[in-house]
Image (cartoon, rainbow, N blue to C red):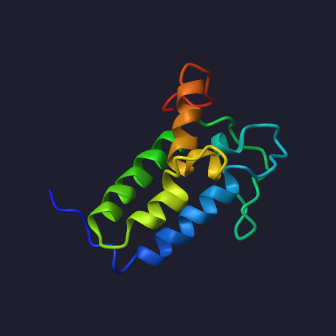
Amino acid sequence: RRTPRLTAVGGLMEQYVQWVAKVQVAPDPNQLDPRAEPRFAIPSGLPDSKPWCRPQKDGPPLRALGLAKYALELLRRPGGAPLLREWLWTGNATQHHGGVIKYDLDWVVENWQSLSCDVWE
């Protein structure tokens, strides 16, 4: 199966990855791990404090899956590996908690059996 080319969305994906790195560690007014936050204010990136069903467990695994697919596409592209190593999977626990993909997967490993707020999650 062919993957879509990143030419048209590459810059947007880089911005999204950097946004994810920011919100994964944002202070949460709801006293939750921000990785399980269902809503964020745009453009600040801060977790939303409005009433909403919390926590929602689908965010971290879906985000990790989507970004892992992006990482694979980066590996296929000349010059894509540095972006992957800088943000997505750093190999260094002190740099973005090992990368935004690893940090979301760590959340999944630690919380997969915990309760969520919606049946579909």
Determine whether 29 is above or below 16 in the image. above
Residue at 64 percent of width and 43 percent of height = 35
- The residue furthest front is 92
Give the quarter of the figure containing the N terminus. bottom left
Could you tell me residue 87's position as x and y percent? 54, 59
Determine whether 111 is above or below 86 in the image. above
- The residue furthest right is 29
Q: How many marks?
A: 0
Taking depth in this image into account, of 14 and 84 the one nearest to the observer is: 84
Residue 69: image quadrant is bottom left
Determine whether 91 is above or below 88 in the image. above
Taking depth in this image into account, of 52 and 34 the one nearest to the observer is: 34
Could you tell me residue 30's position as x and y percent? 81, 41
Residue at 62 percent of width and 63 percent of height = 19
Residue 104: image quadrant is top right
- The residue furthest top is 113
- The residue furthest left is 1
Could you tell me residue 82's position as x and y percent? 45, 66
Left or right: residue 69 compared with residue 37: left
Could you tell me residue 89's position as x and y percent? 49, 50
Residue at 68 percent of width and 38 percent of height = 53
Left or right: residue 56 compared with residue 120: right
Left or right: residue 114 compared with residue 78: right
Left or right: residue 51 compared with residue 84: right
Residue at 61 percent of width and 21 percent of height = 114
